[in-house]
Amino acid sequence: MSDKAILTCALTGVLTNPNMGNIPVTPEEMADAAEQAWNQGATIVHCHFRDQRPGMGAYPTWDVGVVKSIIDAIKARVPEIIINQSTGVVGPDISGPVACLQAVKPEMAACNAGSLNYLKLKEDGTWAWPPMAFDNPVEKVQAFLDVMTANDIVPEFECFDSGIVRSVALFKKAGMFQGDPHISLVMGVASGQPAKPEWVPLLKNEMLPGSHWQVICVGRKEVWDLQRKALAEGGNVRTGLEDTFYLPSGEKARSNGELVEALAKITREVGREIATAEEARRILGTARGV
């Protein structure tokens, strides 16, 4: 299935302000967004979860009841879709995402594979937010992997820099996880890997043989050039309102479905076929069917 490309849609980000666009928050909105993405060719939805209290939709939650209500709504609407749960938290306390993993048991989950100074500047040279360290030391990564292994969840190693990509190979050799790695190259974060297409083959060469990989790009026009390069190099791709608000034309996207539609068009232009959910499960090695 080397020509099959898996399309993922990241429905909503960890702190994406709903006032900035048509950002889904409620279970019904998340289910609507997942269905739109599915109809355009996405077989995986990457899910963050938002506080459901009035006026709090810009903030994340690890409330198990909220998380289950969102996942249940998505699965009721699109039974075949693959759920990829976010797990990212700052600090050593991972009890929130772990409780959600154990309650929901998604087929896949993000596993942030290394630490990064998460930085961004405004045009005037001031910080867009207070400089923060997104800390993911080895013991934290191992704790997540242990939970994922126990619950038959495929880890998606999110890699924000080249050294983190190389660390995944070390995790494998150290026996921290089984099976072929699934790596997400997160590109475009100001203090991480740049959104430059020429970096893709270099990063690909640092992966273990047999690795599955995709590009996640944060930005505007550069997103689409990078996705095209990833597809040409045999990788998988992701889009969604977590990653970008803008279509290849430069117009603002009105929905996750519009972004996936644009990505599907590029996939076909490159000469790749879009994987079905059944094919994606076989490629990625998830053990469960519908």
Image (spheres, rainbow, N blue to C red):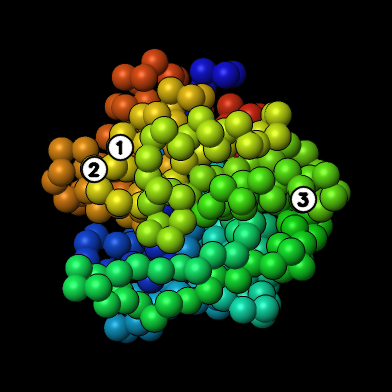
Q: Which part of the image, by quadrant, shows the N terminus?
A: top right
**Circles 3 and 2: CB atoms closer than 8 Å:** no
Q: Earlier in the sequence, mark 3 or mark 2?
A: 3
Residue 221 is marked as 2
Which residue was labeled with disc 3? 171
User: Residue 193 at x, y = what percent?
Assistant: 46, 50
User: Residue 161 at x, y = what percent?
Assistant: 53, 52
| Drawn side of residue 18 relative to residue 196, left or right | left
Q: Amino acid at mark 3?
A: Phe
Which of 233/152 is in front? Answer: 233
In this picture, is 97 found above or below 191?
below
- Name the image quarter holding residue 58: bottom left
Residue in the picture at 31% in, 34% down: 225
| Drawn side of residue 59 relative to residue 23, left or right | right
Which residue was labeled with disc 1? 224
Q: Amino acid at mark 1?
A: Trp
Q: Secondary structure at mark 2?
A: helix
Q: Secondary structure at mark 3?
A: helix
User: Residue 264 at x, y = what percent?
Assistant: 34, 30
**Circles 1 and 2: CB atoms closer than 8 Å:** yes
Q: Give the CA separation, mark 1 to mark 2.
A: 6 Å
Q: Give the CA separation, mark 3 to mark 2.
A: 34 Å
Q: State whether residue 104 appears in this view.
A: no
Residue in the picture at 54% in, 61% down: 86
Q: Secondary structure at mark 1?
A: helix
User: Residue 272 at x, y = what percent?
Assistant: 43, 19
In this picture, is 186 found above or below 64?
above
Residue in the picture at 54% in, 65% down: 116
Label 1 Cα neighbours within 10 Å, binned few <14 / some 14-19 / many ≥20: many
- Name the image quarter holding residue 53: bottom left
Residue in the picture at 39% in, 15% down: 271
Q: Give the CA separation, mark 3 to mark 1.
A: 31 Å
